[in-house]
Image: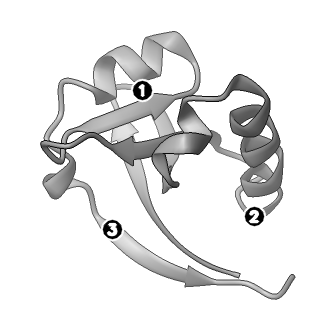
Amino acid sequence: MDFTAAIVKEEETTCVVVVVIKDVVENKYNAEEALKVFSRFFPLMTVVLMAQDHRGDGIFYGPPELVRKLSKTKVEFFPWKQYSVKD
């Protein structure tokens, strides 16, 4: 599986923001399942899912406090990296 993610330090919290399709963040069940999957790859970090709206702005799913902070940050400044893991 290949995916794009960024490890982001937001004040005292380090989290990983994983790019998913918009349908995932708009459906609570799918979002929770995706969080479980990506948590296996980043077991010591909080995982936040991110999709983009029609303007390219981030739509986040995760802990409300982190979502609030991340939504105020321009996603193009996140240190994006391509990950490849074996299923």
Quarter holding the N terminus is bottom right
Q: Earlier in the sequence, mark 3 or mark 1?
A: 1
Task: Choose between 11 and 71: the one closer to the eye.
Answer: 71
Residue sitting at 40 percent across and 75 percent down? 81
Give the amino acid at mark 2.
Answer: Phe
Task: Choose between 5 and 12: the one closer to the eye.
Answer: 5
Q: Could you say whether the residue bearing mark 2 is in a helix, strand or loop?
A: helix
Q: In this view, does 3 lie above or below 7?
A: below
Q: Which callout, 1 or 2, points to the residue nearer the camera?
A: 2
Image location of residue 54, percent across then percent down = 20, 43
Q: In which quarter of the image is residue 84?
A: bottom right
Residue sitting at 42 percent across and 22 percent down? 67
- Quickly name the residue at label 1: 12
What colour scheme has been applied to the protein in the rendered image?
one colour
Total marks drawn? 3
User: Does residue 48 show up?
Assistant: no
Q: Is residue 65 left or right of residue 34?
A: left
Q: Residue 80 carries which label?
A: 3
Q: Could you say whether the residue bearing mark 3 is in a helix, strand or loop?
A: strand
Q: Quadrant of residue 48?
A: top right
Callout 3 environment at 10 Å: few (<14), some (14 to 19), or many (20+)?
Answer: some
How far apart marks 1 and 2 lie (CA) works out to 21 Å
- Quickly name the residue at label 2: 41
- CB-based contact (under 8 Å), mark 2 and mark 3: no
Image location of residue 80, percent across then percent down = 33, 68
